[in-house]
Image: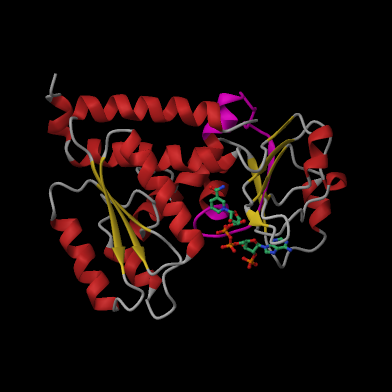
Amino acid sequence: MKGKPLADRIRAEVAEEVRVIGHIGLVTVLVGDDPASEVYIRLKHKAAVEAGFDATDLRLPTETTQQELLDKLAELNASDDIDAILVQLPLPSHLDEEQVIRAVSPAKDVDGFHPMNAGELYLGRPAIVSATPRGVMALLEEHQVELDGARAVVIGRSDIVGKPLSHLLQQANATVTLCHSHTRDLERHTLDADVLVAAVGRTHLISADMVKAGATVIDVGMNRDESSRKVLGDVDPGAMELAAYMTPVPGGVGPMTIAMVLQNAATAARLRRPAAIATPKN
Ligand code: NAP
């Protein structure tokens, strides 16, 4: 279940949408110089430029104060040229992440992290949903994986992946079990899963013998192995022998996340400026 072919298609569709709308302004905000965050920001910015967005790569120094960051976000919120704001997390430790997430206008919050967007998802009427869970759902749909009545097990309950994904799966009529670090006998749950999603951040936590034959396995994990410098998943690749479908790492969920960020930005522009869409430039 490779992510790149579908991600490429979505990115081409978004590029077409940007062309029709004429202008979509996207700002990525990176505070500090964390190397992993730097890579993610570069990838998102490059993808946005390739899709024709008016993309701004805003870099702020590590010493940026909470107030300076909040003032900058208020400025971006107020700018009519900006449709989408992405603040790269984690922030340097002196900054209050929760307050920053709340400071991005929900209409421009293309990460879907604002409590308003998270709440709409919880209530089953989402507008903008976090990109990685949407990417997982798009992959499942593309491969026509049956979710209605299926047993779905999500491992990891973070606000950005596990929790929103568990809602989307439940809204697709799967019976969802959400596992975490306090779950007893993890294997009992994983072996029961028709659809198994690992979003933990522990290399090969899920061994092949924890996967049910014929299951669909989505590996969200991206763990850098310091000795080989490779990126490894949360699931042992040996599980591919048993699974009906399984995403590779890298090249599975990762490319989908980027594509869905861009799609979210196009959605934000459409929702915020319906007139721009009603009167396309050509
Ligand atoms: P996170 O915020 O650290 O959350 C990890 C979750 O895993 C927590 O809910 C934690 O439980 C649970 N967990 C930890 N150890 C466990 C164990 N032994 N058994 C069962 N559950 C366990 O991580 P995240 O931000 O969701 O990211 C998870 C992984 O996905 C990371 O590798 C990250 O790099 C990757 N990721 C990939 C993409 C992509 O585009 N491919 C996007 C986002 C994240 P508690 O809640 O009890 O602590």
Give the percent coordinates (x, y) of residue 93: 44, 78
**Residue lying at 63% horizontally and 42% vertically, measured from the top left:** 250
Is residue 125 at all visible to an observer of this figure? no
Q: Residue at x 23, y 39 (%)?
A: 269
**Left-right relation of 146 to 67:** right
Q: Is residue 49 above or below residue 187?
A: above
Q: Quadrant of the C terminus?
A: top left
Which of the four quarters of the rendered structure image does ligand 1 lie in? Answer: bottom right
Q: Position of residue 174 (x, y in %)?
A: 62, 38
Front position in the image: 77 or 7: 7
Q: How is the image coloured?
A: secondary structure
Q: Is residue 125 shown in magenta? A: no
Find residue 14 and report its image quarter: top left
Check the image and name the residue furthest to the front. 228
| Residue at the image point whose x is 40% and y is 81% from the top | 94
Give how far across and how far down residue 87 sits, in percent.
35, 59
Instruction: Report the side of 77 relative to 194 (left or right).
Output: left
Q: Please tell me how many numbered marks the rendered image carries.
A: 0
The residue at the point 66 percent across, 37 percent down is 247
Residue 100, quarter of the rendered image:
bottom left
Q: Is residue 24 left or right of residue 155?
A: left
The answer, for residue 112, to whether it is visible in the render is yes
Q: Position of residue 208 (x, y in %)?
A: 84, 44
Magenta-tinted stretch: 138-163
Who is closer to the viewer here, 80 or 11?
A: 11
Residue furthest toward the top? Answer: 282
User: Is residue 148 one of those drawn in magenta?
Assistant: yes
- Above or below residue 163? Residue 215 is above
Q: Quadrant of the N terminus?
A: top right
